[in-house]
Image (cartoon, rainbow, N blue to C red):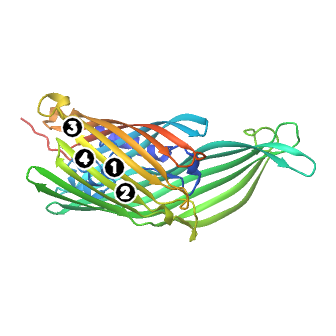
């Protein structure tokens, strides 16, 4: 393995293990947190259209059949930054955060049109903080109290996949999945100082472990000067093991000081049932010059179960997207500019946090740019690595004015490093 990629692999492999990721939303308190979507580089924000994406410079775990297009050793990684504004009525809050969002290592196998891929993606995120002031009425007095609800963590998805071309134009693949996650949810009750009451923190710590299997299929057909690609992929909902620990901390002073006393209440072992996912997309165009995408993605979060019991928390999520890739300078410029690729995308998502409620409507518009980085010129290899950047503005709305709305500006940065596997050196 070339030394540059080997060093990058060693440094980055440990990064997902400590990465914090996700959205900031009060609704991430439900279930396993908010599902995370639309992570893909260097293809910008293809969203639900990603199931039809394939190429020699793209590791696309959304559809493992796309691995058959990889002909070189690849290392792909990226990060995302978000800035958001949440509004409820006349009140609002803003914030920002950044996180490591993806990692993949691809290894082509002989004969060609076959590859192994290992990597990491976020699956869900829990991240919220909000307070509520209230009064507690006792037979002798009325007390002011402040309740704080705070949570963080999430579930990560690690995958080991294989993809191959089995017939001309037809590729299949699979990802073996491993889900690992830790989620912490706190409810803090605080009283004004001087009243003689002890503050408390009720903490729920949840650990999730489970596996799964993801299947993919892609079919390509050349129609005169236009290439048509259709992609299908999906995952059947599997159950995962869950261990939940509950404890209470007592604080005589303000919250944040050392606990006066800690009680471990109980621990619960259970199984949670994750949703099934179906994706379908098609692409039409001239690869390397322009391509148009359209896709659909359905996540059946209403299937979420806990120890076999239905928890009426989440509804199904449906996403639809359109995207266009275009290389406008390919025939009119030289150097890096001639191979730059622009991506424009639009998406519409509906999801309900309780199946009986009206769904949220989310709209997003994205833009991406990929620039090639020529490498290894001393070894007579005409390979390109890619540096990609993308931006998306989205807004989420609900018919009820009492429900929190959110505007989000997202930035992604990704690098795809390509090199030959076991290259043959030439000597004069």
Q: Which residue occupies 48% across, 44% down?
A: 396
Side (left or right) of 354 relative to 203 = left
Instruction: Give the mark toward the camera: 1 or 4.
Output: 1
Where residue 100 is drawn, which disc sits there?
Answer: none
Q: Is residue 207 above or below residue 94?
A: below
* Alpha-carbon span between mark 2 and mark 4: 29 Å
Instruction: Give the mark toward the camera: 2 or 4.
Output: 2
Q: Which residue is mark 4?
A: 73
Where residue 297 is drawn, which disc sits there?
Answer: 2
Instruction: Give the mark toward the camera: 3 or 1.
Output: 1
Q: Secondary structure at mark 4?
A: strand
* Alpha-carbon span between mark 1 and mark 4: 30 Å
* Alpha-carbon span between mark 3 and mark 4: 12 Å
Label 1 with label 2: CB-CB less than 8 Å: yes
Snapshot quadrant of residue 336: top left
Label 3 with label 4: CB-CB less than 8 Å: no
Residue 390 image offset from top left, x and y in percent:
35, 36
- Residue nearer the viewer, 387 or 396: 396
Q: Which residue is mark 1?
A: 321
Side (left or right) of 81 relative to 54 = right
* Alpha-carbon span between mark 1 and mark 2: 9 Å
- Which quadrant is home to the C terminus? top left
Instruction: Give the mark toward the camera: 3 or 4.
Output: 3
- Which quadrant is home to the N terminus? top left
Q: Which residue occupies 59% across, 36% down?
A: 92
């Amino acid at each position: 393995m070339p030394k540059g990629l080997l060093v990058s692999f060693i440094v980055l492999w440990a990064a997902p293990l400590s990465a914090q990721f996700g959205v900031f939303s009060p609704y991430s308190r439900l279930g396993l947190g908010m599902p995370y979507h639309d992570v893909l580089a260097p293809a910008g924000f293809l969203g639900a259209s990603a199931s039809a994406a394939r190429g020699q410079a793209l590791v696309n775990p959304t559809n493992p059949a796309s691995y058959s297009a990889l002909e070189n050793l690849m290392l792909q990684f990226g990060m995302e930054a978000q800035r958001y504004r949440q509004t409820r009525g006349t009140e609002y809050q803003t914030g920002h955060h950044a996180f490591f969002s993806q990692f993949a290592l691809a290894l082509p196998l002989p004969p060609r049109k076959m590859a192994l891929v290992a990597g990491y993606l976020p699956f869900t995120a829990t991240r919220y903080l909000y307070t509520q002031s209230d009064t507690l009425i006792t037979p002798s007095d009325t007390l002011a109290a402040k309740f704080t609800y705070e949570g963080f963590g999430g579930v990560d998805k690690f995958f080991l996949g294989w993809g191959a071309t089995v017939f001309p134009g037809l590729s299949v693949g699979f990802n073996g999945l491993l889900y690992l996650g830790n989620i912490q949810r706190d409810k803090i009750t605080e009283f004004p100082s001087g009243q003689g009451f002890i503050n408390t923190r009720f903490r729920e710590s949840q650990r999730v472990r489970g596996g799964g299997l993801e299947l993919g299929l892609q079919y390509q057909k050349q129609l005169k000067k236009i290439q048509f690609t259709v992609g299908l992929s999906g995952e059947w909902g599997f159950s995962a093991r869950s261990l939940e620990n509950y404890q209470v901390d007592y604080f005589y002073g303000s919250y944040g000081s050392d606990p006066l006393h800690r009680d471990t209440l109980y621990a619960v072992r259970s199984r949670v049932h994750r949703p099934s996912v179906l994706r379908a997309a098609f692409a039409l165009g001239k690869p390397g010059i322009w391509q148009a995408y359209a896709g659909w993605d359905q996540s059946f979060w209403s299937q979420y179960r806990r120890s076999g019991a239905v928890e009426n928390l989440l509804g199904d999520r449906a996403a639809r997207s359109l995207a266009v890739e275009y290389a406008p300078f390919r025939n009119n410029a030289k150097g890096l500019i001639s191979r730059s690729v622009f991506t424009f995308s639009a998406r519409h998502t509906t999801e309900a946090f309780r199946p009986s409620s009206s769904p949220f409507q989310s709209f997003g518009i994205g833009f991406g740019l990929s620039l090639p980085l020529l490498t290894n010129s001393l070894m007579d290899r005409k390979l390109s690595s890619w540096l990609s950047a993308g931006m998306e503005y989205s807004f989420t709305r609900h018919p009820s004015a009492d429900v929190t709305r959110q505007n989000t500006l997202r930035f992604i940065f990704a690098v795809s490093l390509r090199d030959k596997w076991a290259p043959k050196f030439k000597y004069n």
